[in-house]
Amino acid sequence: MGARDNRPGHSRFSPIRRRRATELLLLFVLSLGLSSTALPCEGESCQRHFTLEEVRDVRVPSGGYLREASGLTGLGGTLWAVTDKSNTAIFRLELSSQETVVTAREVPLEIPPSTREALRRCGGRRRRGLDLEGIAAVPGGLFFLLSENYRAVLITRVDNPNGPGSRAIAQEVICIPGQNQSSNDGLEGLSAFPGGVLALEEGRGWPPKRLYRCRFPELQCTLLTSVVMSNRTPGLTLLDPHGVRLLALNTVWGWGNDGNKICEMRADAPTPKACLLNLDRVKEAERERADFPESFRQNGGTNYEGIHFDPVKGRLYVINDNNATWNQTFSGDAEREPTLLLIFTLQKPPASSP
């Protein structure tokens, strides 16, 4: 091992870490500016249609938190997640008999050479990893994984999804039109409906954003509209089975007060229709509940990334990114923030759009 350079003025961080730290600092400054101007679902009173029923820690079998969750979906009553730092697995979330714990079990992700070649043809601006930011599923064990780096959706078959020996195999690729202009303006939200998926592009954190409808087996995408929505939109889920009414997770990087909300929108209209839930107000009101884990009472755990609505159960699930890379870089403790799964029950159905 080489000797550490302790010369005056010499940083102990690698160039990659310094660049990463600079990017994060710029994003922090930008988020402060955004939170002082436009808020998500601006002008909406944010009626409370959902009631918080459960909060659970999301842990891997070794006991630590699932790190950097970035997408959430459900299939056959089981929840699934992806993390933006893992290129080799998706995660099945098992609600443990312990009422405050969810166990995240790895399901290996295989990308055959032909699929990887198709993925490379989609492009890729930054590192060689997938940077998975979204996951969606349709009946029959078919999953869709959103790669922000490659601007692509991997159509993935999961064998024996709820049993032992599960594995995921990426079979085909849908390339999303366009190209990333920076490291943080790529695709974030994904939701699936029979015969297709909807993918929402971040748009550098401010309007306009872009919403794509992609069909399979045609493997083609159409730009629907520019979405007028402030700040980040890292999550997307269907409110109806036809792919028209949607719920969008809208956030301000977890630092804003009154800035993390669930908004209703339509795929055929550029403006959000209503704000249905304010996640910050819910946490402040419910954080002292004795039946919730201690981790929910502490600061952090509000960098929400994934959202899934189950219309059969009338339940809304929200998962956060625990900022593991940030915390490891600046504090040396990747798990200083909890990874939480928030479970809401639908109490007041949103009015049907005309």
Image (spheres, grey):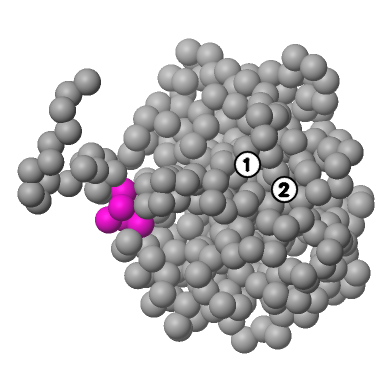
Q: Is residue 192 visible?
A: no
Residue 22 lies within the magenta run: yes
Q: Is residue 279 visible?
A: yes
Task: Identify the residue at horizontal 66%, vertical 72% (top origin).
Answer: 280
- Position of residue 200 relative to residue 72, above or below, is below
- Sequence-earlier tag: 2 or 1: 2
Main secondary structure along the magenta-highlighted residues: helix
Task: Identify the residue at horizontal 25%, vertical 48% (top origin).
Answer: 19
Image quarter hosting the N terminus: top left
Location of residue 305 (image quadrant): bottom right
Residues shaded magenta:
20-24
For the residue pair 154 and 13, the one nearer the viewer reads as 13
Q: Which residue is mark 1?
A: 65
- Position of residue 130 relative to residue 183, above or below, is above
Task: Identify the residue at horizontal 75%, vertical 61% (top origin).
Answer: 245
Is residue 92 left or right of 253 when viewed as pictured?
right
Image quarter hosting the C terminus: bottom right
> Looking at the picture, how far across and down is residue 320, in whole percent?
62, 53
Which residue lies most toward the left here? Answer: 8
- Residue 57 has which mark? 2
Residue 64 lies within the magenta run: no
Q: Secondary structure at mark 2?
A: strand
> Looking at the picture, how far across and down is residue 332, in whole percent?
41, 46
Is residue 272 left or right of 148 when viewed as pictured?
right
For the residue pair 67 and 79, the one nearer the viewer reads as 67
Task: Identify the residue at horizontal 52%, vertical 74% (top origin).
Answer: 256
**Dot 2 amino acid type:** Asp
For the residue pair 219 and 282, the one nearer the viewer reads as 282
**Dot 1 amino acid type:** Tyr
Number of other residues with Cα within 10 Å of mark 2, as a class: few under 14, some 14 to 19, many 20 or more: many
Asked if labels 1 and 2 touch by Cβ distance under 8 angstroms, the answer is: yes
